[in-house]
Every structure is written in structure tokens, then in C-alpha cells.
Amino acid sequence: EAGVAQSPRYKIIEKRQSVAFWCNPISGHATLYWYQQILGQGPKLLIQFQNNGVVDDSQLPKDRFSAERLKGVDSTLKIQPAKLEDSAVYLCASSGPGQGTSGYTFGSGTRLTVV
Amino acid sequence: RKEVEQDPGPFNVPEGATVAFNCTYSNSASQSFFWYRQDCRKEPKLLMSVYSSGNEDGRFTAQLNRASQYISLLIRDSKLSDSATYLCVVNSGTGNQFYFGTGTSLTVIP
């Protein structure tokens, strides 16, 4: 089975610029997550989708971050405008039915550097 | 209070040593517990689930103590390839949401 696909792998932008990340979950997985992992820290949940609906976005900085999953499959995470402290790895993960009890699978992440 | 807390280490142990990591969680309603392994500049990967009765997978043993709200990971006969960061993961108890600890760094030394 194909894994979670993310692109781009790396992105370097200047502060105040915009950036978008893309994620394609494992086929058939209804739940999709975006995590932010700052160097030396564990992943922090930004937003969780169930199909195309948002389940939890309580930790998403909504003044600059947005995410969508219009057709319940692919998802895009956007930052506009970026700040230096947004430098991190952005991880997408997906899970299928019942996987709440067996963890889920991450994509390889997008490493963002804001300069 | 953080949902999940771990000692960040680092743990530096010789090959063949036994090493143990602990992790505490704050939500007594949490139902699912996991250990993930993360290699440098890679994504986290599921190492093992943690069951109430404790479980073993080769050299790895995971245990859960609900009364004290902590989970542990024991690695026996450490190999160089075990060098990584080990992340404790706990679900929210109410949904399919997972909280990660900061990770414990392990380096196995020849």
C-alpha cells in the first residue's frame, strides 16, 4: 500500500512570504492530520480532518495558518504570512477506521525554513 | 499541564545495555498508548502499541500503569541501530486525536 505523500520535501522562504504544503493520505483513510514539529520537540497537532470536515483546529494559529481538504482526500496547509518561528517540519498523517487503537502513518514531512 | 511528558535525555548507553524510558500522561480517560521511533531528519514511525497487560516485541517491552498514569519502554541488549528518539504517544480519550511527548534521545555507543 502506498504511504502518505507530502510535497515539497524542503522549502526556504523569507519572512512575510506565503507557502503551501500538500498531502495525499493513504487511500481510503478518512482521517487526516497536520502536525508541526519544531526542532527538539515532539509533533504538535495543528488540525485534524474527518473526511472534509474539521474535527479539531484548536491549536492552529488561524491568523496566519489555514488548511483545507475540499474533497475529503488531498489536503493543503497554507501559511500567510510566514514568521521566523514557523520554521519546522510539517508532518501529515492519516488513519483509517479503527486505527485510533493502532496509531497512524506519517508522511516524510516538509521541512520549512523561514529566513 | 502538558498532555504527555517525557524525560528528553539524552541517554547514552553502551551496546548490550538495558535502558528504560518513562512517560507520564495527564488525561485519565486516555485509552490508547504507543511508542514511536524517530530517526534523525525522518518522520516518526510506530514502534509498538502499549497494552494494559504489557507487551513484548523481541528486545522491546512496553508497560502501562493506569493508576499512576505512566507508560514505559524497556530495551534489552541495545544495538547501535536503536539510536533514535523515542516518542511517547497518548490518545485524547474522546476521539482519534493523539498527543506526543517531546521525545527521549537514545544513543547506543560501541
Image: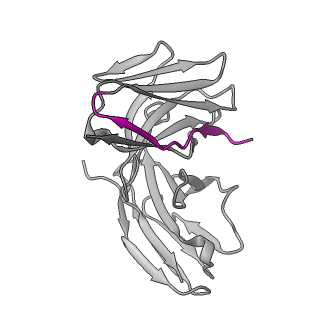
The correct choice, above or below, for A56 with respect to B83 in the image is below
In the image shown, does A55 or B66 lie closer to the viewer? Answer: B66
The correct choice, above or below, for A65 with respect to A5 in the image is below
User: Residue A97 is drawn in which quadrant?
Assistant: top left
| Residue at image point 57% right, 87% down | A17
- x, y (%) of residue B50? 46, 25
| Residue at image point 50% right, 84% down | A13
The correct choice, above or below, for B3 with respect to A23 in the image is above
Confirm whether residue A112 shows in the render. yes
Confirm whether residue A22 shows in the render. no
The correct choice, above or below, for B107 with respect to A2 in the image is above
- x, y (%) of residue B9? 51, 42
The residues colored magenta run B1-16
In the image shown, does B84 or B36 lie closer to the viewer? Answer: B84
Answer left or right for B58 relative to B32. left
- In the image as oriented, which residue stretches furthest toward the top? B53
Answer left or right for A15 relative to A24. right
User: Is B2 one of the magenta-colored residues?
Assistant: yes
User: Is B103 one of the magenta-colored residues?
Assistant: no
- x, y (%) of residue A110? 42, 67
Answer left or right for B1 relative to A111. right
